[in-house]
Image (tube, helix red, strand yellow):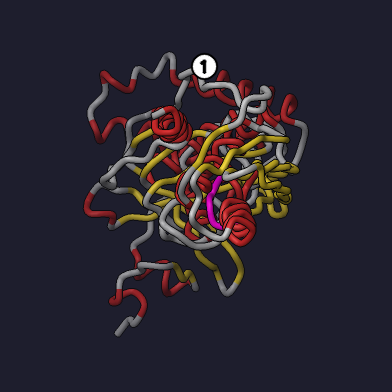
Amino acid sequence: MRRALLALALCCALSLTGCSALLERPYAVVESHTEQPAAGDGSSIQVGTYSELVNAVLFFVSQGTEVGELQLVEYTGDVEEDLNRACLEVATEDPLGAYAVDFIKNQYTRVLTTYEATITISYRRTREQINSLVNVTGTSAIRNEVAEALADYRSEAVLRVGYFTADADAIAQLVRQAYYDAPASAMGMPEFTVSLYPESGSQRIVEILFTYPGEASALRQKRDALQAEVDALMLPLRPQQQSASARRATLFAVAQERIQSAPGGGPSAWDALLGDGADSEGTALAFQLLSGELLVGSTLVEGTLNGEPHFWNQLTEDDGAHYVDLTRSGGGLTYSAADLAELGYVWEGMPVSAENPQ
């Protein structure tokens, strides 16, 4: 009876450390604040099956326990083989173990009809890192968590993701989307690495490490200065009180007057509006920022111009038939897809009629 109660308590504790939704949802975040029972306090956990053995080792990992004691009572399996197999399974196949554990070793002795085992765990993550894991389900949740990390210039985002079968390239694409969706805080695309623990499986821990083009405090100051500048520009314009056509006219007027384009300039809206000028990426981000403030639908387009990386914008009204590239001198302010194709622009999703003009 005692073993059954301990096993039940252990399973409850483990279920609280890794909540996962049963169904894929667009956005779900779960953070557990329930107190967990202490481990490694001198008392042993009793196990009687291989499943209980794995759960016990995983419980130790979830608590950051370095040395844990087990009693194998009425155990019918091969104790030595199962101890080794359970430790290896937790360290390599379980998401938390694969992320947090360096190695697990065990020792055991037989006492009459029971076995007493000592589990020793070496970690490559701190207790704080383990406790700070956020449980999410769905790509929207991943993107939102990444967006929060990027907006505050955090050095890492570590998520326990349920029902996730994509690869590191898919996560990298979400990072890029989150970055370009927030032009006010986009101060230069950070270098980043994506690691999955384990590499395959439906439940994994996703670790994204960021390296920014400057100190976080300096980037926050530039972000705040940029937003303050844009707020000051918008204050007298009152876009909510303008018609759609008036807002678009205002957008082009402000963009022409305030956005500075410079060959070899910086890659951010800050460079375009407050600095010494921006390249196509910074110019497009600045236009995107202003269009959002003025309630004019626009998306950022990434492609090539004459074979070189280039950015511009697409107005989403009129079924997206008009494009804007403020780095171009002369000509009209808007271009059709056919115009851009003739000028040497290439991008994913470009209309077939523009890609293959008659």
Quadrant of the drawing holding the N terminus: top left
Q: Amino acid at mark 1?
A: Ala
The residues colored magenta run 92-96
Instruction: Confirm whether the magenta stretch covers residue 187.
Output: no
Residue in the foreground of this view, choosing between 260 and 192: 192
Q: Mark 1 Cα within 10 Å, few/some/many (few <14, many 20+)?
A: few
157 relative to 230, above or below: below
Question: Residue at the location (44% across, 67% down)?
Answer: 347
**How many numbered tags mark residues here?**
1
156 relative to 232, above or below: below
Question: Residue at the location (37% across, 51% down)?
Answer: 163
Instruction: Confirm whether the magenta stretch covers residue 95.
Output: yes
Is 357 positioned to the left or the right of 127 in the image? left
Which SS does the magenta portion mostly show? helix
Q: Can residue 239 be seen in the rendering of this structure?
A: yes
Residue in the foreground of this view, choosing between 287 and 184: 184
Is 140 positioned to the left or the right of 174 in the image? left
Q: Where in the figure is residue 33, as x and y percent of width and height? A: 47, 19
Question: Residue at the location (53% across, 49% down)?
Answer: 95
Q: Where in the figure is residue 83, as x and y percent of width and height? A: 61, 54
Quadrant of the drawing holding the C terminus: bottom left
Q: Where in the figure is residue 258, as x and y percent of width and height? A: 56, 33
Question: Furthest-front residue in view?
Answer: 112
Question: Residue at the location (66% across, 50% down)?
Answer: 192
> What is the secondary structure assignment of the residue under circle 1?
helix
Q: Where in the figure is residue 210, as x and y percent of width and height? A: 67, 44
328 relative to 251, above or below: below
Residue in the foreground of this view, choosing between 157 and 66: 66
Q: Can residue 254 be seen in the rendering of this structure?
A: no
Q: What residue does disc 1 label?
A: 232
Residue in the foreground of this view, choosing between 356 and 177: 177
Question: Furthest-bottom residue in view?
Answer: 358
